Image (cartoon, rainbow, N blue to C red):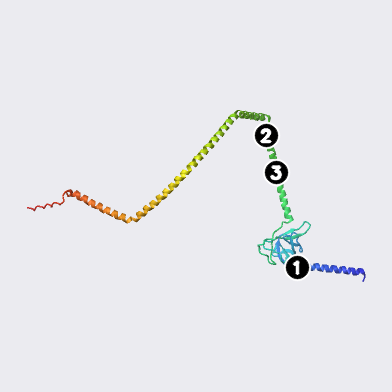
Amino acid sequence: MTTEAKVGAFVLGCVSILAFTLIYLLNAQFGGDTVSYHTYLRYAGGLEPGASVLFGGIDVGKIKSVQPWPSDPTKIEILLNVKRNTPLNEKSVARLGVVSVMSGPVLLITTGSNDAKRLAPDSSISSQETPSLDEIADKMVAVADNSNGLITEARGELREINSDATVLLANLNTLTGKPNQQKLQAVLDNVNETLAEERPKISRLTDQLNTLALHSDATIQNVNGTITDAREPLRNDLTELEATLGQTRALLGDVQTMVRANDDRFDDTMENLRTATENLDQLTDSLKQRPFSLIRIKQPREREVPPEK
């Protein structure tokens, strides 16, 4: 065997070993330790099997297949394999995207929420539609049409504003013309003359106001001093009045206690007074009928009635 043949065989062997190693590593990374999920989109945007699956911007798997969904032909079923420990959860959302301008489309999956329940293998991932280029172009055309209308309206409004500004400038020129300037100068001259004439009066009025303010301060200080002097006697009088009220309350309490203790005696006294009053009434009636009883000790015998003849 020639040297060239030996070198060629060695190179082919190295390439075969390298290819086998790469295939083994890829299968170990994306085949043996991966789990399957699926999601659905209405627009796949050229997504093909083998495209990357990014979870929060990290490459975690590959697209397995992209095909119309038999249950609903209006949707595209996308099967994907991701690493087993990828924390997909119920809040994760899959959508179509690109990593760079030069790269092909990829499937982007958001990280969702830490509190959300983790998705089981072979479950469905929520999806969010990405507008296609045709939809974007339609929206741009609509925006352009609206822009043309807005530009036309703006031109009309600008013409109106221009005419209004022209009128305003003409009015300003009229107001700031030489006749008006002369009138304004005359008014200012009159104001200056009036101020010059009234300045002494204003000065005197200011002095009087200052004097009045000084007297007012002195008066207020005197009132404050009077109130301060009268405050202590008033406080003493109030203290004595409070003490007197306390003594009065105590005296009333003693009187009420004495009245409650002598309720029975008061009742007996009232009964005796009532009896004496009745006796006095009887004595008065007796004196009215027999007034002579006051001077005779012994009552005269009653006259007998003579017998009938």
Secondary structure of the residue carrying numbered label 3: helix
**Three-letter amino acid code of the residue under disc 3:** Ala
**Three-letter amino acid code of the residue under disc 1:** Gly
**On the picture, is 263 further left or further right than 211?**
left
Residue where numbered disc 2 is placed: 172
Toward the left, the furthest residue is 309
The tag on residue 154 is: 3
User: Residue 189 in the image: x percent, y percent?
Assistant: 64, 28
- At x 70% / y 43%, what residue is drawn? 154
Secondary structure of the residue carrying numbered label 2: helix
Secondary structure of the residue carrying numbered label 1: helix
Q: Check disc 3: other Cα within 10 Å, few if <14, some if 14-19, many if 20+.
A: few
The tag on residue 223 is: none
Distance CA(mark 2)–CA(mark 1): 83 Å
User: Residue 166 in the image: x percent, y percent?
Assistant: 69, 36
Q: Quarter holding the N terminus?
A: bottom right
**On the picture, is 8 further left or further right than 50?**
right
Residue where numbered disc 1 is placed: 31
Task: Tally the numbered discs.
Answer: 3
- At x 33% / y 55%, what residue is drawn? 263
User: Residue 288 in the image: x percent, y percent?
Assistant: 19, 48
Distance CA(mark 1)–CA(mark 3): 62 Å
